[in-house]
Amino acid sequence: MPIRSERASERRISIDSDGPPKLENFGEVSPRLFYKIGGRIWASRFNLRNGYQLSEYKRENMIAIIDYGMGNLRSVQKAMERAGAQAKITQKPEDIAKASKIILPGVGAMRPAMEKLDALGLIPAVKKAIAAGKPFLGICLGLQLLFEKSNEGGDVKGLGILKGKVERFSSSKQKVPHMGWNQLKFKKTENGLFKGIAPLSYAYFCHSYFVKPKDAKSAAATTDYGGEFVSAIAVDNIYGVQFHPEKSQTIGLKILENFNKLSDSA
């Protein structure tokens, strides 16, 4: 007989038909009900079209959302859950190592972000996960951190995973920060992240800096704001968006669904 699981903070109390209640730590995951069948854990999910569906729950399918104190973490997690993903907010390198995909969100400035990532010992874990071919998504500041440096308050070193730099918008040309809805001009139609997204779709932005990749071919989308800037990148298993998909309604949800469906390049 299946078991019914009820949420208790980050844990779930499993009520087995042939034994006493058992406390199991499943982490922050999206399905609301779990069942134990044949010694394996299954998760149920409800949608209006198909009703309840059952799929095997595997920890290795977890998406790690990196928490370094500078991001809309819960908003990103909720958006990933709506997109059908199992997502866990974490500061632990071992969670990043176990995860199937990685999301690095972020708002704010590069210098304190790099300092916090370093203090938490997350930089080697991020680089190792990317080198292993795990799909990686940087959001807003998370995109900027992928590059070599930023001119914010003097040169600040980034992760250096991609060649290029981060520069500030000129306030003489337009209002800074760039905030609100703006269009995406896709450069890579085969890019899996934007599969099913109509050309010139709108996404929500909130930033004062933008990336300038050394390799122009890495640009997956551009946006006009006092001139054209790179608003999304795609390089092998590395993806980054300057906008906030978790705030971009239907389009953003579709992008996160696409990311959830990406497979390892390793």
Image (cartoon, grey):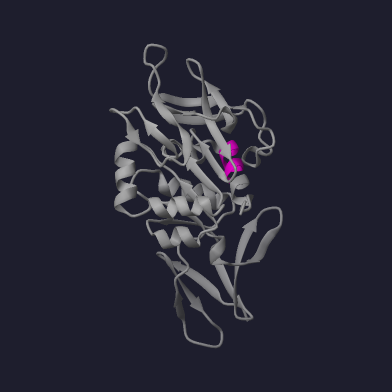
Q: Residue at x 54, y 23 (%)?
A: 223
Residue placed furthest toward the top: 172
Query: Is residue 42 positioned above or below 111 on the image?
Result: below
Q: Position of residue 137 (x, y in %)?
A: 51, 44
How many numbered discs? 0
Q: Position of residue 58 (x, y in %)?
A: 57, 67
- Assess whether residue 110 is covered by the magenta stretch: no
Residue in the foreground of this view, choosing between 5 and 108: 108
Q: Position of residue 24 (x, y in %)?
A: 46, 74
User: Quarter holding the C terminus?
Assistant: bottom right
Residue 137 visible in the snapshot: yes
Instruction: Indicate left or right for 52 with 137 as reference.
Output: right
Q: Residue at x 39, y 50 (%)?
A: 123
Query: Is residue 155 positioned above or below 73 on the image?
Result: above
Within the image, what quadrant is residue 16 found in?
Answer: bottom right
Residue in the foreground of this view, choosing between 117 and 13: 117
Q: Residue at x 44, y 61 (%)?
A: 95
Within the image, what quadrant is residue 72 found in?
Answer: top left
The segment highlighted magenta reads: 250-256
Q: Residue at x 32, y 30 (%)?
A: 155
